[in-house]
Image: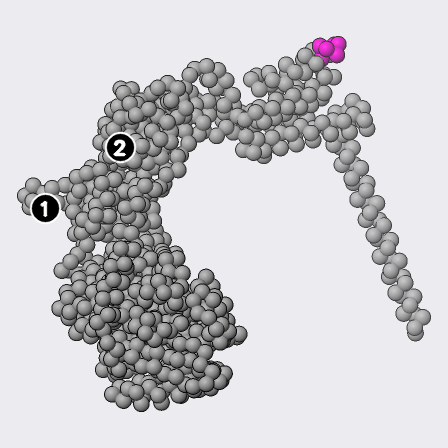
């Protein structure tokens, strides 16, 4: 680069020796001959609108500064037509060596400004660049260069905010193939789009000298793509040609979106009616500067008058734009610095860097030799032969209709007002167009699926056509059928691994992939996935075997719970105690020592369950308690017998392997699907040695390998495991935990506009039950009856018999209470004597109560008679 500039400067020096100063190439303006404080140079290109505005604005700035401060400056203006960098370099050479200027305001293109900066740096003359963009490295290379135009990088955030608010995910960028556009702004646009979840789908670089035929060819290429959102970052002349060609090719119609950046949008006001009509429906982002203050209004009126006088050939488009305002402030920056410093060079540069004043563009202040970057931009919409100012976007705040203290900021531009899109619709375009019958989607389908119920690709014998069947295929067809638009597609078989078929999407050989594709993180570097349409997880399948007989020693206890056994024992002892207490006076065998009676009590409590003692009982109370207890015992005995019989006739099964740790310790061999990611997961995560991992192609191979103990376990994803166990439910089972991995999904290119639409369609299918119906149909086709496990049989608890226990306990308690009460009151009388005594007592109570009621009634009648006679 240094050699290039050295060679170029030598070339410029030779040209400068031969060049003569022509009047049409230069103009010197001095307002007031008194108090001339210095000499200022400027270079403009008046062959375009931006240069014409800059020229008029700078001349006005020199005059305004004199009128306000009574200080004059020599202002040397060099006119370079055609934006040829060598002409601008020659003009800078002439300004420094012949006009002896102390500062130079460089042209509006970076290509020319960079050469002027090199010349100014050699001569130690400050150079103010008003180019649309200045690379960061330029300020380090040229210490005497100052960037006088605000950095427009934040403008790319404004464009990204528009893309986000309209929910577009992909954009195509058309930019001018020059250094300032290519390296200065494009990286910032790419970063801004990534922050909002969008990406650049296509980059189209156009030469500044592109012919109409080249433009048509490039636009035809873009027209064939799905993306319909175009960001245009071109100079105004090239943009005008582009939009005229786009209109001729019907690319300014419905579904198309065009967004222009500041180089175009800031000059839209200067376009004639016929030119601006070709941009109808375009959105634009341009630099914002306050237009309400009196200084700008005065400048606005005087600018229109002066511009119309100097450019009478133009139509009534004389308003000043961003370029005029920036040029005006740049001249004021130099004048203010020269007023405070009588010397040039480094001292003048330092004064410029300390400048701080309110210009037409707002507050002008330099930070690290750059004017403060722009943070506010205006959003416009081209309508008919003019444009509508929709609102504003502020960095860190969002969109607003106005810029003041009462402004309400929103993250979406939908609140700015109605946007008129190309073709006239008022509904926001979706930003892409689905494939047509002429170009349907090419969808890859894997042919090596181990489970054909999910994906089955077969070749017809007679028709020589390929048939695609299975759960994944049916679900995709259902999802496409629920899309709000027609989506043509063709299935194409792929005979390769699952990783390779995902890579084909990245290589653009497939537009999508449909099948039992596992969602794995490393595959995201090539493509994106839909939401999972199956359960996620990885499980271990192992054979089952009969459980050891040692575990069956206490099997007879299984029918009842521990609480049930305790309650049976307690109620039995309690009933025996009641019968013993009632019958002990009548049975000699119930008498004896305390220890003997305790033994008789316990033995009689349980023997009553298995023998009849009804004829030996002497008391009706004990007979009543015994009858109820025998009924309860009969129910319990029959229930116990039935439950135990069921348990003994079942085979108790258990997994042959309990967890992965036992596999590793035993150096066991395991199996997985061929071509699946599971092999790498077993090796990297579960730490199983690669030589102990075998691949299989079908469920039958898994089953056979497990039967002959070729492998100790098989690792299958949950959707596969459900199918496998549905077919081999009596021989195999799952063991260990479920390892968390992604489920199955469909594959689409990164940033595909179809992806959110398909996700939405899948959610609709999930919610309306279609997914459940398809899955049930698949599983049912291989369903078998599982063998019941003993652990699945619930032991009976007291809650199942609480009524019976309450009945027998209540009966025995009632007999006990009656016996105790009778014994205390009547001694050894029989129960019937007790009953008669109770009935006699009840009869006497009733007669006494009736007598009292009769006396009360008579007293009442006597009182009523006496009162009546007294009144008479």
Side (left or right) of 730 relative to 371: left
Please name whichever residue, 827 or 652, is drawn nearer the observer in this view of the structure: 652
Classify 10 Å Cα crowding around label 2: few (below 14), some (14-19), many (20 and above): many
Colour setup of the view:
one colour
- Residue 762 in the image, given as x and y percentages of width and height: 32, 53
**Element under label 1?**
loop
Side (left or right) of 101 relative to 88: right
Q: Which mark is residue 465?
A: 1
Q: Residue at x 42, y 32 (%)?
A: 737
Side (left or right) of 325 relative to 636: left
**Element under label 2?**
strand
Q: Magenta region's main secondary structure?
A: helix
721 falls in the magenta region = no
Whichever of labels 2 and 1 marks the residue nearer the N terminus, that label is 1
- Residue 328 in the image, given as x and y percentages of width and height: 40, 78
The quarter of the rendered structure image containing the N terminus is: bottom left
User: Magenta segment, which residues?
Assistant: 592-597
Give the residue number, with chain letter if any, for mark 2: 673
CB atoms of marks 2 and 1 within 8 Å = no
Please name whichever residue, 849 or 114, is drawn nearer the observer in this view of the structure: 114
**Residue at the extreme right of the image, as rendered:** 870
Classify 10 Å Cα crowding around label 1: few (below 14), some (14-19), many (20 and above): few
Side (left or right) of 611 relative to 89: right
State which mark lies toward you, 2 or 1: 2
Q: Name the quadrant containing residue 736.
A: top left
In the rendered image of this protein, does residue 166 appear above or below residue 587? below
In the rendered image of this protein, does residue 584 appear above or below residue 253? above
Q: Residue at x 34, y 46 (%)?
A: 532
The quarter of the rendered structure image containing the C terminus is: bottom right
Please name whichever residue, 79 or 134, is drawn nearer the observer in this view of the structure: 79
């Amino acid at each position: 680069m240094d050699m290039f500039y050295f060679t170029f400067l030598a070339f410029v020096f030779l040209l400068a020796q031969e060049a003569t100063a022509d009047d049409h190439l230069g103009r010197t303006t001095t307002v007031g001959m008194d108090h001339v404080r210095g000499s200022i140079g400027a270079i403009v290109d008046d062959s375009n609108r931006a240069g014409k505005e800059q020229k008029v604005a700078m001349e006005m700035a020199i005059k305004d500064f004199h009128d306000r401060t009574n200080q004059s400056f020599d202002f040397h203006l060099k006119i370079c037509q055609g934006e040829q960098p060598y002409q601008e370099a020659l003009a800078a050479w002439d300004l420094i060596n012949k006009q002896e200027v102390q500062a130079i305001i460089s042209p509006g293109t970076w290509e020319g400004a960079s050469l002027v900066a090199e010349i100014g740096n050699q001569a130690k003359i400050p150079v103010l660049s008003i180019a649309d963009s200045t690379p960061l490295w330029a300020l380090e290379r040229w210490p005497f260069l100052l960037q006088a135009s605000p950095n427009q990088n934040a403008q790319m955030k404004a464009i990204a905010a528009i893309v986000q608010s309209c929910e577009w995910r992909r954009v195509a960028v058309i930019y001018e193939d020059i250094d300032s556009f290519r390296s200065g702004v494009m990286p910032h646009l790419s970063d801004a789009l990534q922050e909002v979840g969008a990406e650049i789908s296509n980059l189209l670089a156009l030469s500044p000298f592109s012919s109409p035929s080249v433009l048509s060819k490039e636009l035809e290429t873009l027209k064939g793509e799905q993306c319909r959102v175009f960001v245009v970052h071109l100079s105004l002349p090239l943009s005008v040609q582009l939009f005229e060609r786009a209109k001729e090719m019907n690319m300014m119609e419905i579904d198309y979106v065009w967004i222009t950046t500041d180089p175009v949008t800031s000059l839209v006001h200067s376009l004639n009616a016929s030119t601006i009509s070709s941009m109808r429906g375009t959105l634009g982002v341009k630099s914002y500067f306050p237009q309400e203050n009196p200084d700008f209004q005065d400048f606005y009126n005087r600018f229109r008058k002066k511009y119309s006088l100097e450019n009478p050939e133009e139509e009534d488009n004389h308003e000043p734009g961003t370029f005029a305002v920036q040029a005006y402030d740049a001249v004021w920056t130099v004048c203010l610095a020269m007023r405070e410093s009588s010397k040039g060079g480094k001292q003048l540069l330092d004064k410029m860097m300390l400048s701080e004043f309110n210009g037409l563009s707002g507050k002008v202040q330099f930070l690290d030799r750059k004017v403060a970057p722009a943070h506010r931009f205006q959003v416009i919409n081209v309508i008919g032969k003019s444009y509508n100012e929709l609102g504003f976007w502020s960095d860190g705040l969002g969109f607003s209709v106005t810029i003041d203290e009462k402004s309400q900021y929103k993250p979406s531009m939908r609140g700015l007002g109605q946007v008129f899109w190309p073709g006239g619709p008022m509904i926001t375009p979706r930003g892409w167009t689905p494939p047509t019958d002429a170009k349907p989607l090419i969808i890859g389908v894997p042919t090596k699926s181990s489970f054909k119920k999910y994906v089955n690709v077969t070749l017809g014998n007679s028709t020589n056509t390929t048939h695609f069947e299975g759960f994944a295929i049916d679900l995709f067809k259902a999802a496409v059928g629920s899309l709000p638009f027609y989506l043509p597609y063709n299935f194409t078989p792929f005979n390769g691994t699952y990783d390779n078929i995902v890579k084909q999407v990245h290589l653009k050989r497939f537009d999508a992939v449909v099948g039992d594709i596992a969602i794995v993180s490393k595959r995201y570097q090539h493509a994106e996935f839909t939401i999972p349409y199956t359960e996620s997880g990885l499980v271990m399948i192992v054979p089952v075997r009969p459980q050891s007989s040692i575990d069956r020693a206490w099997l007879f206890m299984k029918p009842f719970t521990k609480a049930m056994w305790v309650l049976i024992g307690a109620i039995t002892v309690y009933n025996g105690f009641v019968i013993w207490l009632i019958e002990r006076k009548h049975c000699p065998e119930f008498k004896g020592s305390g220890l003997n009676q305790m033994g008789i009590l316990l033995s009689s409590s349980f023997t009553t369950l298995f023998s009849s003692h009804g004829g030996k009982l002497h008391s009706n109370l004990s007979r009543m308690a015994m009858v109820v207890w025998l009924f309860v015992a009969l129910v319990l005995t029959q229930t116990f017998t039935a439950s135990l019989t069921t348990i003994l006739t079942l085979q108790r099964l258990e997994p042959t392997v309990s967890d992965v740790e036992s596999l590793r310790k035993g150096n066991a061999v395991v199996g997985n699907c061929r071509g699946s990611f599971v092999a790498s997961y077993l090796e990297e995560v579960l730490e199983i040695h690669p030589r102990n991992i075998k691949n299989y192609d079908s469920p039958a191979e898994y089953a056979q390998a497990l039967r002959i103990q070729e492998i100790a376990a098989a690792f299958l994803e949950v959707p596969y495991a459900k199918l496998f166990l549905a077919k081999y439910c009596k021989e195999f089972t799952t063991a260990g935990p479920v390892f968390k991995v992604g489920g199955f999904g469909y594959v689409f290119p990164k940033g595909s506009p179809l992806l959110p639409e398909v996700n939405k369609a899948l959610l609709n299918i999930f919610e309306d039950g279609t997914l459940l119906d398809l899955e049930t149909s698949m599983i049912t086709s291989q369903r078998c009856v599982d063998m019941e496990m003993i652990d699945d049989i619930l032991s009976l608890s007291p809650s199942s018999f609480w009524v019976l226990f309450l009945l027998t306990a209540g009966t025995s308690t009632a007999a006990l209470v009656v016996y105790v009460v009778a014994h205390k009151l009547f001694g050894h009388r029989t129960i019937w004597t007790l009953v008669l005594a109770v009935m006699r007592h009840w009869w006497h109570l009733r007669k006494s109560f009736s007598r009292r009621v009769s006396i009360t009634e008579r007293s009442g009648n006597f009182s009523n008679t006496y009162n009546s006679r007294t009144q008479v």
